[in-house]
Image: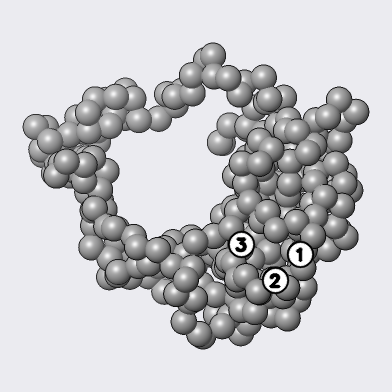
Amino acid sequence: MSVVKVDFLSGEKPVKSLLAKKKSNAGRSLGKISVRHQGGGHKQRYRIIDFKQDKFGIPGIVAAIEKDPNRSAFIALVNYKDGEKRYILAPEGIRTGNEIICNENAPVKIGNRLKIKNIPVGSLISNVEMFVGNGGQLARSAGSSVILTAVGDDGTAQLKLSSGEIRLISNDCYGTIGQVSNFEHNAVTIGKAGRKRHMGVRPGVRGSAMNPVDHPHGGGEGRQGIGLKHPKTPWGKPALGKKTRKKKRYSNKFIIKRREKRK
């Protein structure tokens, strides 16, 4: 078992005004299980995160960096000069006492947020808008970032995502300088089943360990293979390699290069 221990996290309780109720439904819809392997877990409260960061031109001071049970990244509590407090996704390298600002042409500095057209090509950015005014939607998980590869004269910019996909967005969209914090998140070893139960994850049983009535992979004497040419879901659908994206999806025109296939 392993954990990520960092010395810059605040041990204080979260700000009450920035918390919201979070109802646990254990993966059920109308009382029936719609998402398997969910339930239990420690009680959590949702932290209201400011993905838009629409306080333009008002500087803020990072008052604390905290863990958020609802996401893999750390979050930062920002005290703005006008007295308002907000939570934002903490970029890697930001610390308590640092000043940040969101503005159209803010200085290119870790934690600052500005329009894509004013960011140098080749920069790592995170919490990027896909459509103007929608708030950050790309690169929000721990350690993630996108690379700004080009800014065109036609009002668009090209981003290279971590999957290898190259995508067009408007250069009036906003992005935060730097990658998201807690890049060591993927290196954590859970170590025991109980720790997973605290996260609200219930055991997942292999289909080949079930009976034929319960799963297409079930049955057989002893430890058998699945007995099929291709693996299936419990409902008989293809489990691997089946394309699920709609062929005429509206956003196809924004994708210059598709993501790379897993090897």
The image shows residue 224, relative to residue 11, as above or below, that is: above
What kind of residue is marked 2? Answer: Asp
Q: CA distance from mark 1 to mark 2?
A: 8 Å
3 and 2 marks in contact (CB < 8 Å): no
Q: Which mark is residue 89?
A: 3
- The answer to whether 133 appears left or right of 98 in the picture is left
Q: Is residue 164 above or below residue 118?
A: above
Say which element carries label 2: loop
Q: Which residue is tagged 2?
A: 82
Which quadrant would residue 223 be assigned to in this image? top left
Q: Element at badge 1?
A: loop
Mark 3 residue type: Leu
From this viewpoint, is residue 161 visible?
yes
Q: Which mark is residue 58?
A: 1
Residue 255, image x and y in percent?
Answer: 67, 26
Instruction: Give the SS element for disc 3.
Output: strand
Residue name at image x 21 percent, y 42 percent: 29
Q: Nearer the viewer, mark 3 or mark 2?
A: 2
Residue 195 vs residue 221: left or right? right
Residue at 72% x, 33% y is: 169
Q: Spatial distance from mark 3 to mark 2, Cα to Cα?
A: 20 Å
Q: Looking at the image, do the residues carrying marks 1 and 3 touch, with CB atoms under 8 Å apart?
A: no
Please state which amino acid type lies under the numbered disc 1.
Ile
Q: Position of residue 90 (x, y in %)?
A: 64, 66
Residues at circles 1 and 2 in contact by the CB criterion of under 8 Å:
yes
| Quadrant where the N terminus is found in the figure | bottom left
Closer to the camera in the image, 2 or 27: 27
Q: Residues within 10 Å of mark 1 (few under 14, many from 20)?
A: few
Between discs 1 and 2, the one toward the N terminus: 1
Residue at position x 34%, y 60% in the image:
22
Expressed as whole percent of the image width and height from the top left, the position of residue 252 reads 62, 21
Foreground of the two, 228 or 98: 98
